[in-house]
Image (cartoon, rainbow, N blue to C red):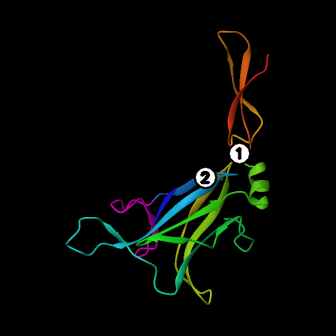
Amino acid sequence: MNIYLDVDNMRLVGGINDAQSPGEIRVACRDTIPVTVTVLKVNTSLLTTSLFVPVDLDAGRSLIFGAKPAVAMNGPYFVSQPVWTKTGTGVYTGSVEFTDALLLAAVGVNTTVALAAEFSQVDVAGNNYASIQFDLSVIPDVNRGGEPLVTRVSPSGGIWALEVSDEGIGNFRRIS
């Protein structure tokens, strides 16, 4: 997943040449998602035509991510990622796990869980700077592992079912 942070206007944008802000981000519960975050500033240079340019965080600052229920902002994080690896100018990578027990319990009884999410720059003392908030919707995972998803009748006979393990490995198995 690619996420672009416009730090001049404190919002998400669609990309280096896309100032449109996504209304929300939707993800499936139980997934671990590799995320690339690009920190952007409005391009003021006449030498390039892009709307934004990637910029590094200020010296001594790092990036953190957290999300909690929109209706319980004083509660614990359901999702967080405090460690991001700088991989280029303004580019940071990490993995975000949507596997927390509180999140799994909330999604288990709902069709979607609305989270308030935030990327923040923090200094070594833990002070927040340039926080960008957005809506994050978590939907139930369709493939939960072990359930037959698809059946088919083989021309050579028999009915087959596709099963998917918790590791996401699919396998056809003859069921009759």
For the record, the magenta segment spans: 5-21
**Residue 108 % position (x, y):** 77, 49
What percent of the width, then of the height, locates residue 15? Answer: 39, 60
Number of the label disc, if any, that sits on residue 148: none
Looking at the rendered structure, the kind of residue marked 1 is Glu
Q: Main secondary structure of the magenta part?
A: loop
Query: What residue is pinned by disc 1?
Result: 167
Earlier along the polypeptide chain: callout 1 or callout 2? 2
- Dividing the picture into quadrants, the one containing residue 160 is top right
Q: How many marks?
A: 2
Residue for badge 2: 27
Residue 7 shown in magenta:
yes
Q: Residue at x 43, y 72 (%)?
A: 90
The answer to whether 146 appears left or right of 39 in the picture is: right
Within 10 Å of disc 1 (Cα), the crowding (few <14, some 14-19, many 20+) is: few
Q: Is residue 138 left or right of residue 14?
A: right
Q: Residue at x 33, y 60 (%)?
A: 17
Q: Position of residue 5 (x, y in %)?
A: 46, 68
Mark 1–mark 2 Cα distance, whole angstroms, equals 17 Å
Closest to the observer, 103 or 157: 157
Of 126 and 171, the residue lying toward us:
171
Are the residues tagged 1 and 2 within 8 Å (C-beta)? no
Looking at the image, which residue sits at the far left?
46
| Location of residue 157 with respect to 123 vertically, above or below | above
Q: Is residue 80 part of the magenta span, yes or no?
A: no
